Image (cartoon, rainbow, N blue to C red):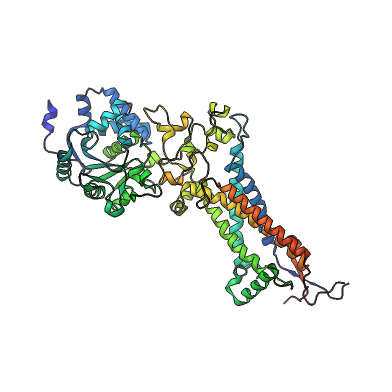
Amino acid sequence: MSNEKKSGVPEKSEHGLEKQGYSIGEILKQRGVSRRDFLKFCTAMTAAMSLPASFAPSVAQALDEVKRPTLVWLNFQDCTGDTEALLRAANPTVGEIILDILSIDYHETIMAAAGHQADEALEQTIAAHKGKYLCVVEGSISMKDGGVYGCTSGRTHLEIARRVCGDALATIAIGTCASYGGIAAAVPNPTGAVGVSDAVPGITVINLPGCPCNADNLTATVVHYLVFGKIPVMDSKGRPLFAYGKRIHDNCERRPHFDAGQYVEHWGDDAHRKGFCLYKMGCKGPATFHNCPTQRYNEKTSWPVASGHGCAGCSEPQFWDTMSPLYRRLPNVPGFGIEATADKIGLGLVAGAAAAFAVHGAMSALRKDKEPQETKEG
Amino acid sequence: MPKQPKYKHYIWELPVRINHWTNVFAIVVLGVTGFFIGSPYSFGGSASDFTMGWLRFIHFVAAYLFAVSVVSRVIWSLIGNKYASWREFFPFATSNGRKKMVKMLRYYMFLDRKVPETFGHNPMATTAYIMLFGLYTLMILTGFALYAQHAPGGLMYRSLGFMYAIFSSQGLRLTHHLGLWLIGGFIINHVYSAVLMDIKEHDGEISSIFSGYKYRIKKPE
């Protein structure tokens, strides 16, 4: 096969990303993925990147020619939910693109090697491809007490992240934990958990928060890198604009019910069965930036709001702390107990002021004041 | 004709009075619409209604009106008469102002029977107003920060970038929500104090915000 001639010594692409042997198009052909499926995938990715459809041929051409990059996947303080989301991606072609097209040289969950063999594989990979590989990080990094609360094979996650992410061309923080610390960083944050960009400052990090991250957004980010040779444009929280540039509320399929004034008042009520807006049930769509309404999950089957549950705001920093309570519009006021809502406190404040001034008024009315000296009635 | 006339003094210039009543109008509209935006009733009979849409539209228009009104008052504090001046709002910064404040506070706390004859602003009131202006600023900034989220990357969103760095999205909502209750508490204080001092000082305190004139025994300087 002609492909074999191309393998062997890794060659360097114009983007500085080191690619291995075969081009993505060639590998797909080898794997029996039809040209039609490949083009469908390219079109889906073009849409995911918020590019016009006319870009699809460019994406296809670029993926046809580009060589597969080396990728290392690190698991830190996490539930492996992002790996799960990826492995269970309903569309086999997409899964194949990610797992086979990218040369995943190290992934603790899916690799065959274990123990010292695995450590060696990681060392070899980063030594051979220093500064030219992509690193995907899943899970938060413990910073407290030197990072001892999160260790793999005797080394702290902080140490591993500094070494592996520090030598990578770019790091993709997949999921909310890797992006902003996630559940581990929720108050009281016993392990001092932070996201990658806080743990290893100064490196190039692309945050793909979400619980779990939408696998399509990960694929689109990698495809963007392969097609354009640079990381996508990001917002102030380090998230690609193509996936996190719009508020859920503004693209929500239930938005007409919000504007009309039709709300679910109780779970299972008539309004809930009719699919009205979940605003009053504590939906955090108005506070959350993510492409869930358009991209959806599981081969675009569904997403929380479509299935009748409000958005939890999982792609926002510190969402465990700032977005709770899950089923209320507003957060609790710190220092006033769990059940005290902002309105109860406000009402108490206004009633207190009214009562105080009523008492003052009564006392003032009963009191005989001295007039300014010059005043005389006449 | 009484033996001892009171002299009338022009205190509140027309722009100050217009500003006051614009604020009253805007705050009432913002408060009512804001309350329904925060915890709406299911007004909508069908999906083609637009009740929340209109409530939000009115809220946003009133918000612009209020913001312009507040900024205008700040500008007027630089060009208006001495009673409108920004100096009035920091009575605690001068020894004379502090003396007046103590007098007023003693009267309010029933420690003194002598009614202090205030001219222009009551020093306790301006102290409350400077805090109120802080609250207005907070309400305008949190409100427009929430509003600008519909167009991330837009000019307003980028200008308010520092707000998103200080507050989480939900933190913006909570602050904006609690701010209204604080303004509600202020209104009770404000109306009560104005009525009280109108009764006690006989200076036309209440009518002054319509006419601009206050009355007192001393001649104008």
Report which quarter residue B104 is drawn in. Answer: bottom right
Tell whether A303 sits left or right of B70.
left
Horizontal and vertical percent position of residue A198: 32, 51
Q: Nearer the viewer, residue A244 or A112?
A: A112
Residue B76 visible at all: no
Report which quarter residue A224 is drawn in. Answer: top left
- What residue is rendered at 57% in x and 33% in y? A265
Q: Nearer the viewer, residue B131 or A168?
A: B131
Report which quarter residue A114 is drawn in. Answer: top left
Placement of the N terminus of chain A among the 4 image quadrants:
top left
Horizontal and vertical percent position of residue A164: 22, 46
- What residue is rendered at 33% in x and 42% in y? A232
Residue A347 visible at all: yes
Q: Number of labelled discs?
A: 0
- Residue A246's place in the image compared with A189, above or below, is above
- Residue A29's place in the image compared with B169, above or below, is above
Horizontal and vertical percent position of residue B155: 47, 49
Tell whether A265 sits left or right of A172.
right
Q: Nearer the viewer, residue A374 or B139?
A: A374
Horizontal and vertical percent position of residue A4: 12, 29
- Residue A11's place in the image compared with B80, above or below, is above
Placement of the C terminus of chain A among the 4 image quadrants:
bottom right
- Residue B198's place in the image compared with A300, above or below, is below
